[in-house]
């Protein structure tokens, strides 16, 4: 198993750029990630994943509805088998992103997934540095998968 799964909702050009930067970062580490919209991802994708990167916007002080729909569908099918799954989270928010962060962490705590680094929160007006940070995130997670750390 050598699978890095990237699941991100991308309702805008900026969020598409961020998702692509994460995927490019993973590719630059020599791994081809599986990149899916939350609506296209299902439990079997998660069951096959060695590590997962989740990306969400903050909407109404919570994670995106798309990511919540994903969690609702995969939670019980993955609960027993994927405890300890290595994951990272990035959030694109207009404000501080805390609502999205807390809402994802509540669910991933229930799933017993392992955040390998603190959530990357990209808040306020879009900055080119956001894509650089996402590239680094993808590269780092891919390295971990390749080296078998995760
Ligand atoms: C319906 C809706 C609700 C939103 N609610 C929040 C929110 O509660 N907090 C926040 O920081 N941003 C909120 N936003 C802003 C989104 O996070 C932002 O549109 C997203 O990060 C995409 O950023 P971009 O405009 O740079 O592409 C909301 C956006 C929409 C469309």
Image (spheres, helix red, strand yellow):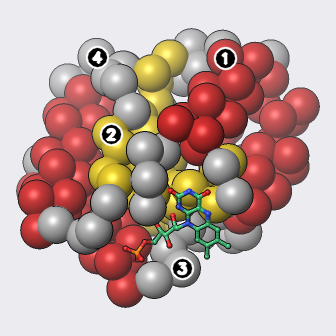
Image coordinates of residue 71 in percent, x first then y, are 77, 44
User: Closer to us: mark 1 or mark 2?
Assistant: 2
Residue drawn at (32%, 60%) of the image: 124
Residue wearing tag 2? 120
Question: In the rendered image of this protein, does residue 85 appear above or below residue 146?
Answer: above
Circle 3: is it few (<14), some (14-19), or many (20+) Cα within 10 Å? few
Residue wearing tag 4? 149
**CB at disc 2 and ligand 1 closer than 8 Å:** no
Residue wearing tag 3? 11
Query: Position of 150 compared to 125: left or right?
Result: right
**CB at disc 3 and ligand 1 closer than 8 Å:** yes
Image coordinates of residue 91 in percent, x first then y, are 44, 50
What secondary structure is found at the residue carrying circle 2? strand
In the image as oriented, which residue stretches furthest toward the bottom?
A: 13
User: Closer to us: mark 3 or mark 4?
Assistant: 3
| Observer able to see residue 141 | yes
Residue wearing tag 1? 109
Q: In the rendered structure, which disc, 1 or 2, sits on the residue that comes first in sequence?
A: 1
Circle 1: is it few (<14), some (14-19), or many (20+) Cα within 10 Å? few
Q: In the rendered structure, which disc, 4 or 1, sits on the residue that comes first in sequence?
A: 1
Q: CA distance from mark 3 to mark 2?
A: 18 Å
Query: Position of 118 compared to 108: left or right?
Result: left
Question: In the rendered image of this protein, does residue 83 appear above or below residue 11?
Answer: above
Q: Nearer the viewer, residue 55 or 148?
A: 55
Q: In the rendered structure, which disc, 1 or 3, sits on the residue that comes first in sequence?
A: 3
Q: Residue 38's quadrant in the figure?
A: bottom right
Q: Quadrant of the C terminus?
A: top left
């Amino acid at each position: 198993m050598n699978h890095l799964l990237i699941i991100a909702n991308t309702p805008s050009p900026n969020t598409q750029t961020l998702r692509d930067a994460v995927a490019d970062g993973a590719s630059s580490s020599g791994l081809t990630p599986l990149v899916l919209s939350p609506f296209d991802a299902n439990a079997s994708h998660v069951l096959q994943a060695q590590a997962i990167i989740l990306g969400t916007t903050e909407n109404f002080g919570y994670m995106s509805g798309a990511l919540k729909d994903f969690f609702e569908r995969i939670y019980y099918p993955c609960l027993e088998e994927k405890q300890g799954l290595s994951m990272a989270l990035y959030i694109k928010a207009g404000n501080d992103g805390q609502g999205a962060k807390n809402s994802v962490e509540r669910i991933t705590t229930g799933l017993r997934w392992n955040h390998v680094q603190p959530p990357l929160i990209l808040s306020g007006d879009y900055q080119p540095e956001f894509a650089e940070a996402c590239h680094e995130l993808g590269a780092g997670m891919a390295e971990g998968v390749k080296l078998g750390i995760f």
